[in-house]
């Protein structure tokens, strides 16, 4: 049994990981989360109080971070500003949290000699052509497009430098697009599901040809736990579940699963610098660490996600109107 610190553990993927750890291990978890607009303590509801503690605070607060590192065995770092559209509107919080926040954690890991796993994204690799036969691997050169992805790329490079220069015991994972319960309604899939619930037509950026490589958040969590247990210090692992779909197909599937005509959506202003396609080759993680995804049926996973949003309006309703008002100012 160990003590884990999980940064960003009240967000979408971080809270999924906390639930996963409580279910599958004996670890105690301390969550460090600033509870920004994206953090929600309700996402941790129902977890045993003797095994999960929420500390509300900022990962750029060096004194707070130092005190928490002194008390734990290992750290999993999810906290980030995570939404591309927000980074195009106001990049500054992305620099503060994603760059300075990661630097602050690395300095604490170095001082206390703690194991750190850094959560990152496939977006650091830029994008692929639709017909490119290759997918991203651990050797693909970094080529980020947005303020969000460039700060994530910067944070990855900081981790690599602290491993090499200071001997910090860190690993990195870069995962593709996650879906599942507890995802903020600003993101593509929950935005469209909650639009349909509210009687608003789904909004597709541009022509909708952009491809994302979908993975269920539960599979991301099992991969991270595998890397924490068996990953080699200094290594990077790509996480993906062979789930490539274009946005148009996803919107049409959501509408169909929700009993609406598949064409009942609007094309809206495209995202500036919109990455065309992401695709992950996760061979290294599968062959070297023996991980594999449990969700092979995207349609079934999406149907369960739709059911969750239909049953948990209390979780998402408080943020819905503000998100739609913001998108409306952008013609989206
Ligand atoms: P999210 O926006 O849902 O959650 C982020 C969490 O971090 C929130 O709880 C927020 O309150 C917290 N946070 C933000 N700034 C903080 C700060 N300064 N100090 C402490 N806490 C802070 O994000 P998510 O989608 O769950 O993503 C989590 C991580 O996974 C991010 O690092 C992201 O880059 C990465 N990632 C996400 C995806 C995806 O599809 N969502 C895919 C690959 C990687
Ligand atoms: O690839 C991993 C990344 O996936 C993570 O690093 C990010 O944190 C996460 O937000 C996600 O980034 P994307 O930009 O791919 O996700 P988003 O949900 O914002 O958009 C998915 C696709 O859907 C993208 O091509 C833009 C499009 N889109 C999005 C919204 C919100 C629409 O067509 N309509 C919309 O309303």
Image (spheres, grey):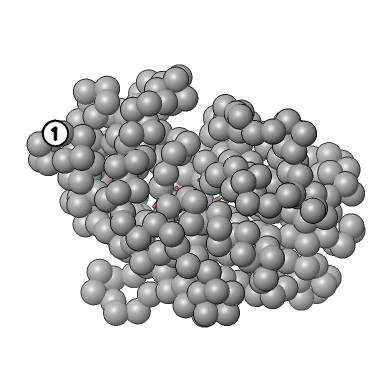
Q: Residue at x 55, y 54 (%)?
A: 221
Residue 12, above or below 54: below
Residue ID at (30%, 49%): 300
Q: Quadrant of the C terminus?
A: top left
The quarter holding residue 54 reads: top right
Report x, y in % for residue 114. 83, 60
Residue corresponding to mark 1:
260
Residue 152 visible in the snapshot: no
CB at disc 1 and ligand 2 closer than 8 Å? no
Q: Quadrant of residue 55?
A: top right
Residue 301, relative to residue 306: is it above or below?
below
Image x and y of residue 279, in percent: 37, 67
Residue 325: x percent and y percent? 35, 23
Nearer-the-camera pick, 290 or 63? 290
Q: Residue at x 12, y 41 (%)?
A: 262
Q: Nearer the viewer, residue 239 or 26?
A: 26
- Let me know if residue 235 appears in the view: yes
Work out whether residue 106 or residue 261 is closer to the camera in this orientation and state it: 261
In x, y percent, where is residue 320? Answer: 39, 24
Task: Please tell me whether residue 220 is drawn above or below residue 199 in the rendered image.
Answer: below
Name which residue lies at 56% across and 32% down. 43
Q: Quadrant of residue 112?
A: bottom right
* Ligand 1 quadrant assignment: top right
Q: How many marks?
A: 1
* In the displayed structure image, the side of residue 241 where residue 252 appears, left or right: left
Mark 1 is surrounded, within 10 Å at the Cα level, by few (under 14), some (14 to 19) or many (20 or more) other residues, namely some
- Is disc 1 placed on a helix, strand or loop? loop
Q: Is 85 situated above or below 290?
A: above
């Amino acid at each position: 049994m160990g003590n884990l610190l999980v940064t960003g553990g009240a967000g979408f993927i971080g809270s999924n990981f906390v639930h996963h750890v409580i279910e599958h291990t004996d670890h105690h978890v301390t969550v460090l989360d600033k509870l920004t607009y994206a953090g929600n303590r309700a996402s941790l509801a129902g977890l045993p109080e003797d095994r999960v503690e929420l500390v509300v605070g900022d990962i750029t607060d060096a004194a707070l971070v130092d005190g928490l590192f002194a008390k734990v065995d290992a750290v999993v770092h999810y906290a980030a500003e995570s939404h591309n559209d927000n980074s195009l509107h106001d990049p500054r919080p992305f620099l503060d949290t994603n760059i300075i926040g990661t630097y602050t954690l690395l300095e604490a890991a170095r001082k206390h000699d703690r194991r750190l796993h850094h959560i990152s994204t496939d977006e650091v690799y830029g994008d692929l052509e639709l017909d490119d036969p290759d997918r991203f691997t651990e050797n693909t050169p970094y080529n980020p497009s947005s303020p969000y992805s460039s700060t994530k790329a910067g944070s990855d490079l900081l981790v690599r430098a602290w491993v090499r220069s200071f001997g910090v015991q860190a690993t990195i994972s870069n995962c593709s697009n996650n879906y599942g319960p507890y995802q903020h309604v600003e993101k593509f899939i929950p935005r469209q599901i909650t639009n349909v619930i509210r009687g608003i037509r789904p909004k597709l950026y541009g022509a909708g040809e952009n491809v994302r490589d979908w993975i269920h958040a539960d599979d991301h969590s099992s991969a991270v736990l595998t890397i924490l247990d068996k990953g080699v210090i200094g290594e990077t692992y790509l996480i993906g579940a062979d789930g490539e779909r274009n946005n148009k197909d996803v919107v049409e599937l959501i509408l169909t699963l929700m009993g609406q005509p598949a064409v009942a959506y609007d094309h809206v202003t495209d995202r500036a610098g919109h990455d065309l396609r992401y695709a992950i080759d996760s061979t290294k993680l599968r062959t070297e660490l023996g991980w594999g995804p449990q969700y092979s049926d995207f349609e079934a996973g999406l149907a369960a996600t739709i059911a969750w949003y239909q049953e948990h309006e209390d979780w998402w309703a408080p943020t819905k109107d503000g998100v739609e008002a913001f998108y409306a100012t952008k013609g989206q």
